[in-house]
Image (cartoon, rainbow, N blue to C red):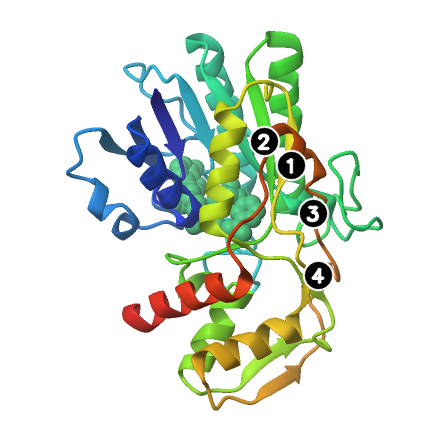
Amino acid sequence: MNIVVTGGAGFVGSHLCDRLITERHTVICVDNLLTGSKKNIDHLLSHPNFSFLHHDVIQPLPTTIHPDAIFHLASPASPNHHSALSYHALPMETMMVNTQGTHELLKTAEKHKSKFLFASTSEIYGDPLEHPQTEEYRGNCSPTGPRSVYDEAKRFGETLTAYYQRERKVDTRIARIFNTYGPRMLKADMRMIVIFITQALENRPITIFGDGMQTRSLCYVDDTVEGLLRLMTYPATSGEIVNIGSPQEHTVLEYATMIKQITQSKSDIILSEKLPEDDPKRRRPDIGKAKIVLSWEPKISLKNGLSKIVTYFKSSV
Ligand SMILES: NC(=O)c1ccc[n+]([C@@H]2O[C@H](COP(=O)([O-])OP(=O)(O)OC[C@H]3O[C@@H](n4cnc5c(N)ncnc54)[C@H](O)[C@@H]3O)[C@@H](O)[C@H]2O)c1
């Protein structure tokens, strides 16, 4: 297939490009390098089936591109207030790429009868009142809170995608991706796992917001990519909304402890500051639907995944 991956120079997108090239597809990676890096796709640039287009997807795609399928992953994704790459620091860019950008890409999909996948997020569930979250759960989000530039933009991106499916007969699907980790995550993103690994490798204190009892469920990037690929290519996925994430829940304190062990660090683990406003205390996917529709569940153990990302950071520091 001739496949467009928006956000293909980012963390998840670049792994998806790798996988699609391995599967012998032709890949057009479309990215404006806002939060991604050409370094992530350097190794693909000379591949005959791969091309890179420096482009902001808020603008229409060049008319020369006729995709069979579009994976729309472009969007800032880091929630850390202190990161210059977070959606807090890039609010307009985040809102526009998930709304206007999604609309532009859906128009392209309609024109070329392309299959379309929207990369949504567990953040559309907000600070959930149900646990674990099934796809039927409608979420507990603030339309005006600090995270709303991301949550609400993704929610509207879902609305657009569902509208194009329902009324305009475009073949779409929505992946609600939960926290994903792995090589090529950026230090500058300041996502929890990267901060902990960096602190541990430098033997600095590992700092946790709040009491560390808030939980996270982390999925290794290869598993996430497998889920996205199946959602695009498996039969009977048209119009489906599917959670992609790990149901294995651990406290933030447990992650810090595991990373300290794997890195054999001398770091102390320190509980500091209070939780940022709107920080979800628990979030875990119910992946029952992914198991049925995609025969998918994560395969890579947390220990194995953490070892891989630690090795990556050791070699890239
Ligand atoms: N990583 C996670 O844990 C996670 C969790 C839930 C959802 N997601 C979603 O998955 C997608 C990828 O996330 P990621 O972690 O790889 O983030 P990332 O920041 O590493 O990658 C996003 C990519 O999109 C590009 N981009 C942003 N705006 C663009 C625009 N207007 N035009 C073209 N390119 C643009 C960036 O330059 C970057 O390369 C995002 O849509 C994100 O919301 C990720």
The residue type indicated by label 2 comes to: Leu
Secondary structure under the numbered disc 4 in the rendered image: loop
Residue 65 is marked as none
Q: Quadrant of the C terminus?
A: bottom left
The residue type indicated by label 1 comes to: Lys
Q: CA distance from mark 4 to mark 2?
A: 30 Å
Q: Is residue 293 above or below residue 73?
A: above
Residue 294 is marked as 2
Looking at the image, is mark 2 or mark 3 nearer the viewer? 2
Question: Are the residues at dot 4 and dot 2 in contact (C-beta closer than 8 Å)?
Answer: no
Q: Position of residue 90 (x, y in %)?
A: 50, 50
Judging by the rendered image, the residue that carries numbered circle 1 is 291
Judging by the rendered image, the residue that carries numbered circle 3 is 285
Q: Position of residue 136 (x, y in %)?
A: 78, 34
Q: What is the quadrant of residue 45 in the picture?
A: top left
Judging by the rendered image, the residue that carries numbered circle 4 is 279
The residue type indicated by label 3 comes to: Pro
Question: Are the residues at dot 1 and dot 3 in contact (C-beta closer than 8 Å)?
Answer: no
Q: Residues within 10 Å of mark 3 (few under 14, many from 20)?
A: many
Q: Residue at x 68, y 42 (%)?
A: 287
